[in-house]
Image (cartoon, rainbow, N blue to C red):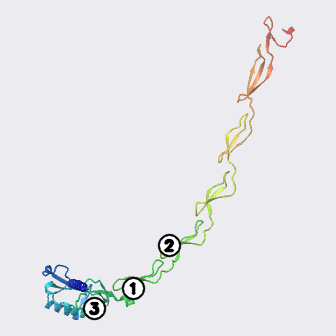
Amino acid sequence: MERRRNLLKKVLIYVLTVAVVLSNGMFMNLKKAKAETYYQYLVHFSKPFTMTGSLKNTIEGIMKSSSVLKKSEDSLCVEYLINEKSDYVNMYKNIVANLDASTLVNPGFYIRAMVGMGNKLSDTPQNATLAEAKNLISNDAQNHRSLYIYWQCGHIYDSSRWQLTSAATCQHNNQYRCTICGETKSEGNTISHNYSSCISGATCQQPAVYKCTMCNSTINQGSTIGHNYSTYVSGATCQHPAIYKCTMCSNTTYSGGYANHTWAQKSAATCTQGQVLYCTTCGTQTAGAGATGHNYSSVSVTAPTSSSKGYTRHRCGCGAYYDDTFTYKVEYDAKRWLWKCGEPDDKL
């Protein structure tokens, strides 16, 4: 039991030693740290600001009397040798005590603060009122609480600072901009589309189209209308009636009756075949005039011979013919006298 107590005592001493080292910002060997310069970060002021009154006087007075306080454009820190640490705690508390809305000014903005809420230097700063931050620093003997000052625009309390930049539409609600800090916000609800702009009237293909006056969206309203077949395309033929096209689309329709065939001669009538006609539109064929009949206009006479009769031949231009007016053939007797076949011998 006694052994356990001694062990716990040793561990506690070790932990306390480490805590002291960390609280003083010493992350290195103590021997080596003797020649190191230590910077303790005190206050960071978010720009822009104007420092006046007791705060300005306090800082300027400390800087005249001590070289450990360093001031930049937006921060204060103390600089000292670790082995010769100055007593800056009271100095820091005096500065913080004089910090208020009258000594640190940014017109139109309220002071806001961030400060470490825990007991360790490594604690992450958290939001706090300036009064809360000052109270924590005032009551902190170790003074490890660096203070961060930033600004909050007064528009959170004064609604008159919000200027309407864009009224609500179908795409967004009311848009506001702060006239002091330029921050923007949205409030309210969007409004309905205003489909009052007719961009195309109703046709046979679609109803009338209306566009929203606030955006590019469109809707169809109403119904389609009938086709307007008033554009003449082609006249009636033997194949179809006259064709008319709709003035609003590519649809076509027939109107009226069919036209008659347009006949033309394909082949003329001959003595053996009738005339052939064809339709110049559709190609249909039909019979025209009948065959003309043979024209036996060519006449030739063949005299009889001793071996054949004589005859008259009538010939058509197509080659057809017929014979008539036959005569008897010529015969000779033993004496080679000529006599006509069928005549009496006493006339020879």
Label 1: how many Cα within 10 Å (few below 14, some 14–19, many 20+) = some
Label pair 2/1, CB-CB below 8 angstroms: no
Give the quarter of the image for residue 35: bottom left
Report which residue position mark 1 lands on. Answer: 163
Q: Seen in the image, is 268 located left or right of residue 113?
A: right
Report which residue position mark 2 lands on. Answer: 217
Three-letter code, disc 3: Leu
Please name which of the two marks, 3 or 1, marks the residue nearer to the observer: 3
- 274 up-or-down from 87: above or below: above
Task: Determine the residue positioned at 81% across, 16% down.
Answer: 328
Measure the C-alpha gap from mark 2 to mark 1. 29 Å
Q: Seen in the image, is 219 located left or right of residue 259?
A: left
The image shows residue 52 at horizontal and vertical percentages of: 23, 92
Q: Is residue 81 visible?
A: no
Label pair 3/2, CB-CB below 8 angstroms: no
| Nearer the observer, 260 or 194 | 194
Report which residue position mark 3 lands on. Answer: 136
Measure the C-alpha gap from mark 3 to mark 1. 38 Å
The image shows residue 280 at horizontal and vertical percentages of: 65, 46
Residue farthest toward the top in the current orientation of the protein: 335
Label pair 3/1, CB-CB below 8 angstroms: no
